[in-house]
Image (spheres, rainbow, N blue to C red):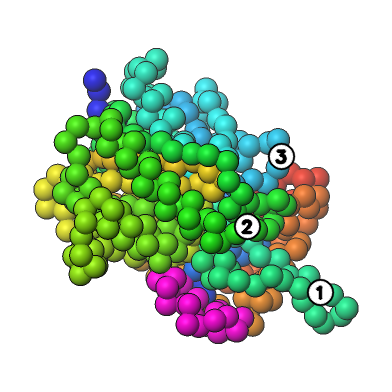
């Protein structure tokens, strides 16, 4: 059987952020609960940023490093999102256009809450394994965003159900080039545990608002993590949760949920003491939280961001197996694994994702609230609007060599973008 997995990976997580502790205080939330989030910052999407621009900006550095022949070997493009901009037209068509991919390419979109990125990755993996087109590559881009909208009521009052969902909701995209040369992450073929059932934990009943039951979501996440792993264990001989995996990457709605899930696994499967569990969390899990703590939950892209964070911050001096858990509300989940090497970390660090996060501009709370009002002009279903890009100086604040795609206009529902 051929090797398969992630050849290259990159993230783009916007140009602006806020300090989530400042936000929690600004919203007068219960600060006694705040530390349980294990969060520091969250990316805030500007009106000129959307799932298309995030996706293209994540993928472009990967494609720029390819030869023309390698770029033309991409025969499958999957966008994975719960933040689509049209009920029919896939954002993969926009992404395909602005990345300049060849037209002999299959393009479509997947939606299954936060599981979508792994669904796309596994579909791409099995496409490569099928060898129906030997030597071809697949591009999988998970791209999601939180866009809170404020509307004026009676002149100067606002109506919004503020909760801890706001500090944890982020924006961004992760692009993965999948092929039979998995320099970054070699998939353990057949080592998958799935678990899913119908539950109304969180959902998006309208395009621009997420709602649900946070307690039910936590319980579903914990159940799926345990049951998906146990199914994985049935399929793979000689597995031990504490010793098989050098590191663990989790879908991260917020760090506290991951810590609770890991604690549950260590207590039930390993019978570990609280002290040993805490030490294990710090060693195997914390490297995967570092970027997530700075970006927030980017839904379908969050597990991939955790994997990126692990590869950027873990001490990988020899081949290591990473266990990965993905959860999507509603729900579907999967535990799978792959092998990384010192080369994996080197390739990921070359993408300088931490430096990109450092270049984001911090917004004040007044600037942030003003953006929430402005978001109504680009909400789902807008027919016509022209954006004043000079109003967003942070989109020009990257290095001189960096070119970012931004939304500039919506003309009869058709979105138009430009490079800045």
Side (left or right) of 205 relative to 40:
right
Which residue is at a point 61% across and 41% down the rendered structure image? Answer: 91
Q: Which mark is residue 196?
A: none
Give the magenta part as a residue range: 20-41
Which residue is at a point 54% across and 56% down the rendered structure image? Answer: 216
Looking at the rendering, in which quadrant would you find the N terminus? top left
On the image, numbered disc 1 is attached to which residue? 152
Asked if marks 2 and 3 touch (Cβ < 8 Å), the reply is no
Q: Earlier in the sequence, mark 2 or mark 3?
A: 3
On the image, numbered disc 2 is attached to which residue? 212
What is the CA distance from the residue labelled 1 to the residue labelled 3?
A: 27 Å
Looking at the rendering, in which quadrant would you find the C terminus? bottom right
Q: Quadrant of residue 255?
A: bottom left
Q: Earlier in the sequence, mark 2 or mark 1?
A: 1
Give the SS element for disc 2.
strand
In terms of depth relative to the viewer, which is nearer, 198 or 375?
A: 198
* Residue count near mark 1 (Cα–Cα under 10 Å), binned few <14, some 14–19, many ≥20: few
Residue 151 lies, with reference to residue 77, above or below; the image says below
Q: Position of residue 233 (x, y in %)?
A: 27, 37
Asked whether residue 186 is in view, the answer is: yes
């Amino acid at each position: 059987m051929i090797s398969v997995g992630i050849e290259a990976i990159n993230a783009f997580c916007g140009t602006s952020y806020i300090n989530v502790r400042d936000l929690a205080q600004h919203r007068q939330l219960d600060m006694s609960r705040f530390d349980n989030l294990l969060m520091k910052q969250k990316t805030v999407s500007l009106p000129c940023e959307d799932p298309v621009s995030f996706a293209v900006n994540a993928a472009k550095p990967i494609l720029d490093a390819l030869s023309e022949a390698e770029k033309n070997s991409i025969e499958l493009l999957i966008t994975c999102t719960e933040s689509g901009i049209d009920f029919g037209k896939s954002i993969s068509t926009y992404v395909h256009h602005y990345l300049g991919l060849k037209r002999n390419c299959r393009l479509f979109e997947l939606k299954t809450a936060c599981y979508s990125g792994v669904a796309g990755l596994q579909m791409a993996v099995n496409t490569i394994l099928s060898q129906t087109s030997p030597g071809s590559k697949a591009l999988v881009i998970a791209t999601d965003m939180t866009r809170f909208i404020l509307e004026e009521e009676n002149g100067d009052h606002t109506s919004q159900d503020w909760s801890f969902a706001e500090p944890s909701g982020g924006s961004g995209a992760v692009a993965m080039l999948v092929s039979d040369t998995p320099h970054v992450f070699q998939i353990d073929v057949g080592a998958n545990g799935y678990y899913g059932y119908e539950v109304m934990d969180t959902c998006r009943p309208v395009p621009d608002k997420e709602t649900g039951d946070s307690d039910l979501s936590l319980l579903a996440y914990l159940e799926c993590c345990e049951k998906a792993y146990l199914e994985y264990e049935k399929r793979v001989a000689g597995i031990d949760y504490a010793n098989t995996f050098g590191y663990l990457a989790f879908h991260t709605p917020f760090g506290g949920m991951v810590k609770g899930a890991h604690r549950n696994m260590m207590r039930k499967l390993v019978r570990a003491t609280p002290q040993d569990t805490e030490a294990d969390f710090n060693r195997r899990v914390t490297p995967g939280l570092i970027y997530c703590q700075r970006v927030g939950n980017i839904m379908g892209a969050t597990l991939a961001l955790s994997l990126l964070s692990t590869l950027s911050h873990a001490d990988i001096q020899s081949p290591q197996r990473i266990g990965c858990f993905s959860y999507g509300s509603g729900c579907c989940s999967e535990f799978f694994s792959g092998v990384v090497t010192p080369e994996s970390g080197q390739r990921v660090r070359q993408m300088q994702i931490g430096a990109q996060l450092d270049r984001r501009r911090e917004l004040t709370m007044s600037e942030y609230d003003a953006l929430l009002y402005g978001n109504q002009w680009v909400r789902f279903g807008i027919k016509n609007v022209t954006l004043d890009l000079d109003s967003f100086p942070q989109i020009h604040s990257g290095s001189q060599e960096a070119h970012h795609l931004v939304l500039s206009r919506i003309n009869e529902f058709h979105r138009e973008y430009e490079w800045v």
